[in-house]
Image (spheres, rainbow, N blue to C red):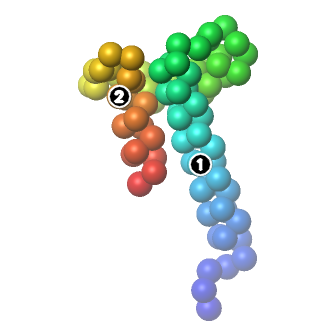
């Protein structure tokens, strides 16, 4: 037989959480690129959620103008 009845929901849950996190990183990238107001509660939530891994990546990856390349690298690495 294939997988058990418990592994499919767990895989679905993990995949959904990764997709939501990728969406949060994408939204943060777009908000930074547009120069949006970061005093907005939604923007502050996105910054709090995505800041820890981006802080580590920013040590090694520089930004190019208004483009935050660390956000792009994080999105690409989470897609794999």
Residue appearing at x 59%, y 14% in the figure:
36
The x, y position of residue 79, in whole percent, is 45, 51
Helix, strand or loop status at disc 2: helix
| Quadrant in the picture for residue 65 | top left
Residue farthest along the front direction in this orientation: 34
Helix, strand or loop status at disc 1: helix
Q: Quadrant of the C terminus?
A: bottom left
The x, y position of residue 74, in whole percent, is 42, 37
Q: Nearer the viewer, residue 37 or 5?
A: 37
Residue appearing at x 65%, y 70% in the figure:
7
**Residue on which the image places disc 2:** 69
Position of 43 with respect to 26 (left or right) is: right
Q: Could you tell me if the residues under marks 2 and 1 are in contact, i.e. CB atoms within 8 Å? A: no
Q: Is residue 59 visible in the rendered structure shown here?
A: no
Is 46 above or below relative to 44? below
| Quadrant in the picture for residue 54 | top left
Q: Is residue 9 visible in the rendered structure shown here?
A: yes
Is 48 above or below relative to 80? above
Position of 6 with respect to 22 (left or right) is: right
Position of 74 with respect to 45 (left or right) is: left
The x, y position of residue 33, in whole percent, is 48, 21
Q: Which mark is residue 19?
A: 1
Q: Would you call the spot at circle 1 few (<14 residues within 10 Å), some (14-19), or many (20 or more)?
A: some
> Marks 2/1: CA distance?
19 Å
- Frontmost of labels 2 and 1 is 2
Q: Nearer the viewer, residue 20 or 56?
A: 20
The x, y position of residue 21, in whole percent, is 58, 40
| Quadrant in the picture for residue 40 | top right
């Amino acid at each position: 037989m294939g997988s058990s009845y418990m592994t499919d929901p767990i895989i679905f849950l993990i995949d959904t959480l990764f997709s939501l996190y990728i969406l949060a990183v994408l939204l943060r990238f777009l908000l930074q690129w547009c120069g949006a107001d970061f005093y907005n509660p939604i923007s502050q939530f996105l910054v709090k959620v995505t800041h820890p891994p981006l802080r580590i990546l920013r040590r090694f990856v520089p930004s190019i103008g208004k483009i935050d390349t660390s956000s792009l690298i994080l999105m690409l690495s989470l897609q794999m």
